[in-house]
Amino acid sequence: MWGNQSSITEFILLGFPLDPRIQMLLFVLFSLFYTFTVLGNGTILVVIWLDSRLHTPMYSFLSHLAFVDIAYACNTVPQMLVNLLDPVKPISFAGCMTQTFLFLTFAHTECLLLVVMSYDRYVAICHPLRYSAIMDWRIYIALVVTSWILGVFLALVHLVLLLPLPFCGSQNVNHFFCEIIALLKLACADTHINEVMVWAGAVSVLVGPFSSIVVSYVHILCAILKIRSEEGRQKAFSTCSSHLCVVGLFYGTAIFMYIGPQHGNYKEQKKYLLLFHSLFNPMLNPLIYSLRNKEVKCALKRLLIKERMPRKSHIITNKGLSDIF
């Protein structure tokens, strides 16, 4: 269906035009980073799923964020690794459009999930006695479902505007994946509406949510400073600082890429910045949450202890039977 929309049936991702030896080094490094991303976020998913003490809205939101990070990386990194080994290996038109759609879906959804998580922290710290009443499971499900639906809808809007465009010129995409702005530069038609929609979508999904997160954390900071217990303040700061680190990394890079300067020498810089956004952010998120969150670390320790206990009891049982006989 998509192939009939264009005279071009496949694209070539230029990626990073470097020396072959450097490309091989990058392949090894990025493969390791990709493995750490999947294992780190996968560990968070397993820990939250298996530990009943973490079955709360806060950690359920975190599990969705971990899933989005895995999907985010799986959508772009494997193709990038293939291109590092074989720079001229093409990607089909349908595959390219699918990759663009999935990237936009996961990016939008993560933006909205981070806003929802900031609201959850605001309720937990500023209204602790009413937290269970305000953030019950019905509200949690509504917030998560809304985040995913809006993420898919916004990505569909860009895809519907992108598909009718004719691609009749160069098939070389100056990026390591099918990024929407890089694709628009290859279209043989006026892309002004598409560019306006990309900019408007970035402003609505990045600037608006980021502003609401800042407002939430101003109230949270004021509430934390009023806590008399030093232990309570440290716990609140630990939980919120983890989320703030993720917010800063995600929104900082995204705002610069899609709202910052669009011309001049910034083009190549943004390609490398998007590499950080797509590869390093998902890898750092589980490290930030696990290293700065005591409950996640304790839950992981409990699971590791549970795995060792049956083995030890089995050894003791066998030893006792050998003593009897």
Image (spheres, grey):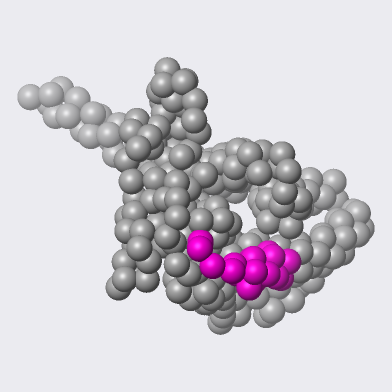
Residue nearer the viewer, 91 or 140: 91
Would you place residue 113 above or below residue 262 in this image?
Answer: below
Quarter occupied by the C terminus: top left
Residue nearer the viewer, 76 or 210: 76
Instruction: Judge whether residue 111 is colored magenta.
Output: no
Residue 282: x and y in percent read: 54, 46
- Give, as a single range, the part of the protein colored magenta: 187-205
Would you place residue 278 above or below residue 196 in this image?
Answer: above
Residue 265: x and y in percent read: 71, 39
Mark yes or no: residue 162 visible: yes
Kindly identify the residue that appears in the image at 51 percent across and 56 percent down. 186
Instruction: Judge whether residue 189 is colored magenta.
Output: yes
Would you place residue 26 above or below residue 242 in this image?
Answer: above
Residue 219: x and y in percent read: 87, 64
Residue nearer the viewer, 277 or 129: 277
Q: Is residue 102 left or right of residue 210?
A: left
Quarter occupied by the N terminus: bottom left
Q: Is residue 23 left or right of residue 122?
A: left
Q: Is residue 296 left or right of residue 14?
A: right
